[in-house]
Amino acid sequence: MAAQQDQPAMQNRNESEKTMAVTATAPWKQLLLSALESNSHLRHSSFFQLATIGSDGRPSNRTVVFRGFVERSDKIQINTDSRTRKTEELKQCSFAEICWYFTDSWEQFRINGRVDVIDGSDPDPVKLELREKSWFASSIKSRLQYLGPNPGLPCLTEQHPSELFLDPSSGPVAAFCLLVLDPEQVDYLNLKSSQRTIFTIGQRVNGENSWNSESINP
């Protein structure tokens, strides 16, 4: 009798195991790389929205540019001006979420986690090196933006960006800041195949990170 009573529970557990997988790597990363590749002919495919939490508790959103992954990781890099509101918001609350939609393949990635704000005052030499690499990986035109007036303040001058000068060999200016988002959950939606998967990071018994994936209704 006891075995018969336990049978439904065993069946439910087996069904759950069919929809959930555990892996030490980030399975969503390959999906994202494939989406970037298939949409590479679209200039806006490297743009996504980054939402933070404002000091008043309200959401704050803007469009930013994908600057690649930190080498040998799934951490996402974003360049920004240290004088912008989002850097202050992230210093107060490091949680943020990305919403990235690829118009050609009809795929959406919602990626949330914590953001590390790396500016010139960071005491970690490894992080400073990462910031410097991101600086030199940017175009001169992009770097010149950080020499402009303070973002968000009233315009007091008519100085044109073409009037600014920057030595291409010089390192990051004080206003340049690197944001590194460390994903904790990824909500993947494919509208063409009506597929939706939630990827969540966890830890194994030995303390190593692992990713759980579960298929859910779109």
Image: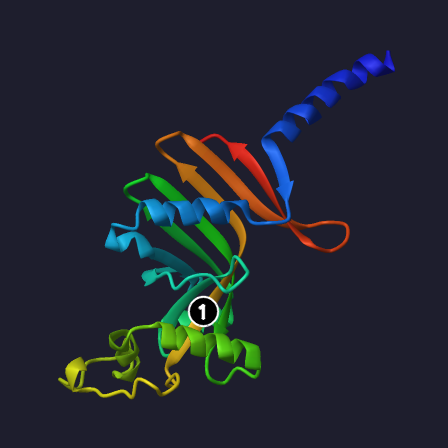
In the image, is residue 205 above or below residue 141?
above
- The residue lying at 23 percent from left, 88 percent from top is 165
Q: Amino acid at mark 1?
A: Leu
The quarter of the picture where residue 158 lies is: bottom left
The quarter of the picture where residue 58 lies is: bottom left
Q: Is residue 163 visible?
A: yes
View extreme (right): residue: 1
Foreground residue, 15 or 69? 69
Left or right placement of residue 207 versus residue 16 in this view: right
On the image, the x and y values in percent for residue 55 come to 44, 68
Which color scheme is applied? rainbow
- The residue lying at 30 percent from left, 51 percent from top is 40
On the image, the x and y values in percent for residue 123 come to 56, 84
Foreground residue, 160 or 32? 32
- The residue lying at 40 percent from left, 29 percent from top is 194
In the image, is residue 97 above or below residue 174?
above
Foreground residue, 128 or 72? 72
On the image, the x and y values in percent for residue 94 come to 51, 65
In the image, is residue 114 above or below residue 106?
below
On the image, the x and y values in percent for residue 62 come to 32, 61
In the image, is residue 155 above or below residue 111?
below
Residue at image mark 1:
179
User: How dense is the environment of label 1, judged by Cα within 10 Å: few (below 14), some, or many (20 and up)?
Assistant: many
- The residue lying at 37 percent from left, 82 percent from top is 175
Foreground residue, 181 or 74? 74
Left or right placement of residue 183 versus residue 203 in this view: left
Position of the C terminus, as image quadrant, is: top left
The quarter of the picture where residue 2 lies is: top right
Q: Secondary structure at mark 1?
A: strand
Position of the N terminus, as image quadrant, is: top right
Q: Is residue 81 visible?
A: no
